[in-house]
Image (tube, rainbow, N blue to C red):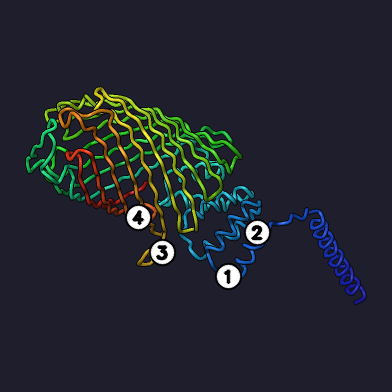
Amino acid sequence: MNGQKYKRDIWEYFETLGLMLVLVLIATQVVAQPTVRKSDRYQRNFEELMKDPANPERSFQFAKVALEEGDLNGAISSFERILQINPRLDNIKLELGVLYLRVGSTVLATQYLKEAIDSPDIPNDVRNRAKRLYNIASDASSPHTFSVRIGLGAHHDSNANAAPSSRVVLVGGQTGLLDENDTGQSDVSASIQASLQYLYSFGNQEGDHLEVNLMEYSRRYDDLDEINVDALRFDIGPRFYLGPLISAKTSFRPYLAGSLTYLDSEKYQTNGQLGVDTSYFFDEFFKTTVKLVYDEQSFYNSDDRPYSDQRDGNGFSLDANIDYDFTPTFSGFLGIGASSRDAEVKYESRSLQNLLAGVSYSFKPPFQLPYRWSTSLTAVLTEVDYDAPDPAVSQDETREDSRDDIYWRTTMVFTQRYYSTIEVFKTKNDSTLPNYEYDNLGMNLVFWIAM
């Protein structure tokens, strides 16, 4: 009995000693940790969050502030809380994948990044960023990545041929009358489109890669065969990332592109481009993109278009866009653009300026479907100024167009592979010449398969 009591006393002694050692180690770590004073803004947002932890907007706002002040764990907790409320937010999954990668938790990083990559509703540039980080997290053995999308569409246009609604036009400066068949015509059409993307990883720590895109588009009209279109486009170029390995803030991609277009089965246009596409992430919620392009265009004459080659020429374009996530489900975007084009004849040379603005919102789908749907509203204003009068229309009046476009688009995601987009749009083109004034109200419905 005394022996057993002695053994029990020994075990209790070692348990007490072990507990004391653990407490000493914890205390040492606490003392060793520097005390970082959080800003008043951080404390204020934290207090607001604690008042209503189930509020996703407060969690989102606190995550933004926590990231700005380097509190990665606080940001992770907030994002996880948002996903508990809305488990289908792909942008939040991407940010969690990035954060888990930064803190060294590669298993969770690959899980969230893979879910973001598989979502059909995520933008292509965001998907490519997720693929790059996924390859880092999973240490993928193959440097090759392929993705394919196929779309089948049905369309309706109130003015498919973009012609004036009035028969009264100018011909050589004099009033003339169009044939009724040459005014604006409504029509329905069907389309098929496909895109193939290939990424080749260079295998460096920055995640740089080669990106190749190939796209095909065909559309057939019920009545207006002369505007049936077939188009093929490709672009190729490397994408480089600048900044920290995981959270690179800048990427740029120089590329070479080309396209070929047929109208009514006759060769209409070829286009070659040299461009550079640059993106900068101010933070996880605020991004800007700038694209500069030089292009050469060639047009081909046909019986219906005997003077198309007068439009041959080259030009430059510059576009800048910003995107900002206000909440996990609501974002806004703004863009400006300008371009200049020279042609064989002065009346086909022109300059263009545009401004676009829009908002996007994701929401819980009906029928308990597993993926969130999204809807967006975009407005575009475009001004086009030509360099000289077209003597076939007017010898004195130079063409100037002012075009307004409004698009409402909804993306309905059914599975990771199948989704659909429906778009309703309104176009109004005002011009100094009646020949180019027209309106169009249209709808596009496209069913997509992603592979």
- In the rendering, at what x and y percent does residue 65 appear? 61, 55
Please report the residue visible at 26 percent of the width from the left and 52 percent of the height from the top: 445
Question: Looking at numbered disc 2 in the image, what kind of residue is underneath it?
Answer: Tyr
Please report the residue visible at 27 percent of the width from the left and 30 percent of the height from the top: 260
Q: Is residue 194 visible?
A: yes
Q: How many angstroms separate mark 1 from mark 3 (CA)?
A: 21 Å
Q: Mark 1 vs mark 4: which is more N-terminal?
A: 1
Q: How many angstroms separate mark 3 from mark 2 (CA)?
A: 30 Å
User: Label 3 crowding class (10 Å Cα cut-off): few <14, some 14-19, many 20+?
Assistant: some
Q: How many angstroms separate mark 4 from mark 2 (CA)?
A: 36 Å
Question: Looking at numbered disc 4 in the image, what kind of residue is underneath it?
Answer: Thr
Q: Name the residue under label 1.
A: 52
Dot 4 falls on a residue whose secondary structure is strand
Q: What number is the disc on residue 411?
A: 4
Please state which of residues 365 and 322 is positioned toward the viewer in this rendering: 322
Q: Mark 1 vs mark 3: which is more N-terminal?
A: 1
Q: Which of marks 1 and 3 is in front?
A: 1
Q: Mark 2 points at which residue?
A: 42
Q: Are marks 4 and 3 in contact (CB under 8 Å)?
A: no
User: Label 2 crowding class (10 Å Cα cut-off): few <14, some 14-19, many 20+?
Assistant: many
